[in-house]
């Protein structure tokens, strides 16, 4: 208890200093102190903090201490309320957390408190999501106000909240329209940029734009924090695996082994790679609840034609001539639809073969050298685009501190020189 109180006083002292210097970047960095405070906090400890700051006991607990917090800035109050919301959500007191966030958001906020207010919007949205209340209208109103005040931190958080609510309600078109008509702030925190890229990747995947979706997902992985955000990284990796399978690519084994909780997706990759429909159907039946919780069930259901294509590729390599009846038996397809499925695969360029309709057989063609096709050019262009995007992001991320003192000294020197010149003149 004493250790938590000492850490809280130190954190609030740093917040107070940042508020006095009006350094918004320092306030954003101070958010990193909250996870450690949350881990050591309890209902009793935050009730004592509330009594020490406001002078009254909260509705969700009673204090046992008479200590006082000598801080009164709006930034310190917002920082303390974020801690209250974090602990209350952890203790499943969602209504109290929502009430605290709403009361703090409605108060007049300074420009320096932007990062703290943005975090309060995040926990307000989390409380609404836990209660299954996906009403985006009040968040749209708050987003308009943030645009009028040019609050970039709040804009970034609210854009991600609104996109998530649209996706949870399966309003993909509205989410796409909202993303197209709103501009995401360039100087937003990396965490919000990563979330935005993830949501845009999911939107593009649902709209069958798999290439753009994979690009967004890779950007989300690059912007994700290195030492935290394990749940977010796992969600991004799950979506990436499904999108790669929909594009006809097989994920690298090392990436799948490096994450815990990808057992269902490893079995899915094996089923798609084998080209066996029965095995694929068994995987969907076994892990349907898991795919549904990850919001990937609709995407996984689209992999049926990918499984068929993988099976046709194997048959095309193994047999020079094979009957359509044997293909239907091997792939588990209805015999009446097999000829149309094979013809479509040939037209799409999946296999190099020809259908003999009279004898009901599939004749494979001699495979050409891969270097005579456009595949090496596409792979090389993909690597070039990745390197150029990495270079452009690195250039945009370069930031330099504002040297106010140097500029003031320079202005004073210029004024002294002008006075001396006037005297000489």
Image: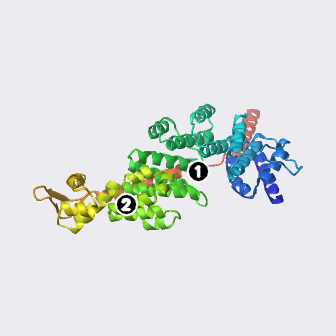
At x 40%, y 62%, the residue is 269
**Percent of width and height locating residue 334:** 25, 56
| Label placed on residue 280 | 2
Q: Nearer the viewer, residue 220 or 38?
A: 38
| Image quadrant in which you'd find residue 350 | bottom left
Q: Is residue 66 left or right of residue 107?
A: right
Locate residue 336 relative to residue 266 in the image: left or right.
left
Question: What distance separates the C-alpha of mark 2 from that of mark 1?
Answer: 35 Å
Q: Secondary structure at mark 1?
A: helix
The residue at 77%/44% (across/down) is 76
Q: Which residue is mark 1?
A: 191
Asked if 255 appears above or below 386 in the picture, the reply is below
Label whose residue precedes the other's in the sequence (2 or 1): 1
Q: Give neighbour class at mark 1: few <14, some 14-19, many 20+ (Cα, 10 Å).
A: some
One can see residue 407 in this view:
no
Give coordinates of residue 162: x percent, y percent: 55, 40
In the image, residue 170 lies at what x, y percent? 47, 42
Q: Secondary structure at mark 2?
A: helix
């Amino acid at each position: 208890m004493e250790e938590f109180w000492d850490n809280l006083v130190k954190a609030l002292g740093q917040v107070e200093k940042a508020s006095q210097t009006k350094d918004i970047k320092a306030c954003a960095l101070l958010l990193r102190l909250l996870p450690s405070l949350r881990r050591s906090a309890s209902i009793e400890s935050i009730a004592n903090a509330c009594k020490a700051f406001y002078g009254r006991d909260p509705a969700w607990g009673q204090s046992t201490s008479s200590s006082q917090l000598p801080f009164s800035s709006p930034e310190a109050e917002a920082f303390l309320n974020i801690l209250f919301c974090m602990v209350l959500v952890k203790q499943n007191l969602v209504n109290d957390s929502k009430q605290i966030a709403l009361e703090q958001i409605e108060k007049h906020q300074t420009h320096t408190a932007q990062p703290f207010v943005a975090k309060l919007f995040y926990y307000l949205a989390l409380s609404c999501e836990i209660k299954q209340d996906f009403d985006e209208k009040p968040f749209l109103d708050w987003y308009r106000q943030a645009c009028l005040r040019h609050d970039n931190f709040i804009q970034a958080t609210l854009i991600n909240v609104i996109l998530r609510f649209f996706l949870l309600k399966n309003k993909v078109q509205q989410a796409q329209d909202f993303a197209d008509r709103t501009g995401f702030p360039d100087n937003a925190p990396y965490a919000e940029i990563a979330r935005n890229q993830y949501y845009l990747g999911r939107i593009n995947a649902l709209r069958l734009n798999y290439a753009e979706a994979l690009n967004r997902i890779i950007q989300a992985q690059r912007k994700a924090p290195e030492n935290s955000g394990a749940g977010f990284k796992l969600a991004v990796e799950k979506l990436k695996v499904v999108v790669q399978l929909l594009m006809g690519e097989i994920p690298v084994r090392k990436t799948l082994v490096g994450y815990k909780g990808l057992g269902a997706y490893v079995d899915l990759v094996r089923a798609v790679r084998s080209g066996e429909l029965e095995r694929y159907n068994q995987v969907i039946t076994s892990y349907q609840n898991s795919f549904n919780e990850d919001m990937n069930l609709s995407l996984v259901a689209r992999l049926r034609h990918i499984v068929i294509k993988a099976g046709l590729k194997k048959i095309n390599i193994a047999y020079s001539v094979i009957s359509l009846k044997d293909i239907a038996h091997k792939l588990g397809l209805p015999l009446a639809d097999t000829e149309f499925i094979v013809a479509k695969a040939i037209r799409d360029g999946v296999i190099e073969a020809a259908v003999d309709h009279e004898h009901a057989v599939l004749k494979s063609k001699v495979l050409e050298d891969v270097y005579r096709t456009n595949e090496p050019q596409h792979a090389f262009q993909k690597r070039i685009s990745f390197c150029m995007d990495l270079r452009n992001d690195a250039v945009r991320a370069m930031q330099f501190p504002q040297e106010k003192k140097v500029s003031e000294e320079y202005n004073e020197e210029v004024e002294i020189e002008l006075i001396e010149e006037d005297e000489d003149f």
